[in-house]
Amino acid sequence: MDSNSMLSTGFSDTWQVAPGVVGLRTLFVNVALAGTPDNEWVLVDAGLGLFAGTIRKTAEKHFRKPPQAIILTHGHFDHVGALKELLEEWKVPVYAHPLELPYLTGEADYLPADPSVGGGLMAEAAPLYPHRGIDLGSAVHPLPADGTVPGAEGWRWIHTPGHSPGHVSLFRDSDRTLIAGDAFITVKQESALAVMQQEREIHGPPMYFTPDWEAARISVATLAGLEPLAAITGHGAPMRGEELRERLWVLSDRFVEMAEPQQGKYVDRGPDDIRRQGQ
């Protein structure tokens, strides 16, 4: 099925991104289901709250059993919203990068959003978005140090920080399929109109929630170097083929010009400055 082919349900869309990879949009953020109908599969991210039922129904349609695990690209509110409700039914382990664990075990909060960047309604409303960490207790575990993804044979995780300290992306080498989280996205997330229209165009991570722009630049370069053939990102519709590879290379080459805000709370600050501001 073409990456533009989708089933629209008003507040959610589904896409067949690649063999065994289903994307689901929950209002304005995506989750991914990766695996095979008769074998193991994992849920990548948990979308917004109130969408647990939609995620479960999508899983039941495409897979014959619950996931082996839930993998988090990062722990921002719009990627963990339905997590606790899903865990009540599925009772599976959650995995995240070790640097993301403090935000998932109640030990730390993310930095507040910066409404001054991006110039759109979604950015202006950013102070209303939750930035507190959540406490998953013993349900959350560090991803294996060898880069494997529990429950998802053939996939590996790649540390792609910048948008958050422990942000990861997932890559399947066999067909060069990428689950990028918010390392880069395919919609101008700062603009409410762009989000509603879901026009596909590659952008850097959401500006209002990205504190480390140098790390974000390096992460995009890392993903461009993989030359993915299909990608689903945390926001926006999937992309594939030459369009994806060319636009991702352009973003990498012109990252400062295209993605990094010229001013803002977190521009021209290093990791040490960011940590101090978050204390």
Image (tube, grey):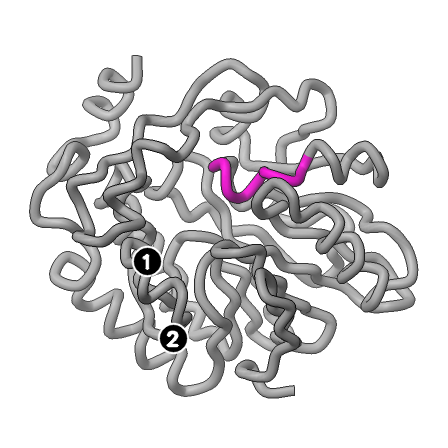
Which x, y percent locates residue 162? 33, 42
Asked if 35 appears above or below 8 in the picture, the reply is above
Which x, y percent locates residue 188? 30, 62
For residue 93, what is the image quadrant?
top right
For residue 30, what is the image quadrant?
bottom right
Q: Please, which residue is most extreme toward the left here?
A: 262
Query: Magenta region, mostly helix, strand or loop?
Result: helix
Residue in front for this viewpoint, 184 or 117: 117
Please name the residue shown 36% across and 43% down the image: 163
Q: Report how far apart the C-alphas of labels 1 and 2 lie in the structure.
A: 14 Å
Q: Say which element carries label 2.
A: loop
Q: Which mark is residue 192?
A: 1
Q: Position of 106 compared to 129: left or right?
A: right
Q: Position of 188 compared to 35: left or right?
A: left
State whether residue 220 appears in this view. Answer: yes
Q: Residues within 10 Å of mark 1 (few under 14, many from 20)?
A: some
Q: Amino acid at mark 1?
A: Ala
Q: Earlier in the sequence, mark 1 or mark 2?
A: 1
Residue carrying label 2: 200
Asked if 79 appears above or below 41 in the picture, the reply is above
Please name the residue shown 41% across and 70% down the image: 198
Which x, y percent locates residue 207? 26, 47
Q: Which residues are magenta?
A: 76-83
Residue in front for this viewpoint, 204 or 98: 204
For residue 18, what is the image quadrant?
bottom right
Q: Say which element carries label 1.
A: helix
Q: Please, which residue is most extreme toward the front here?
A: 10
Q: Is residue 183 magenta-colored?
A: no
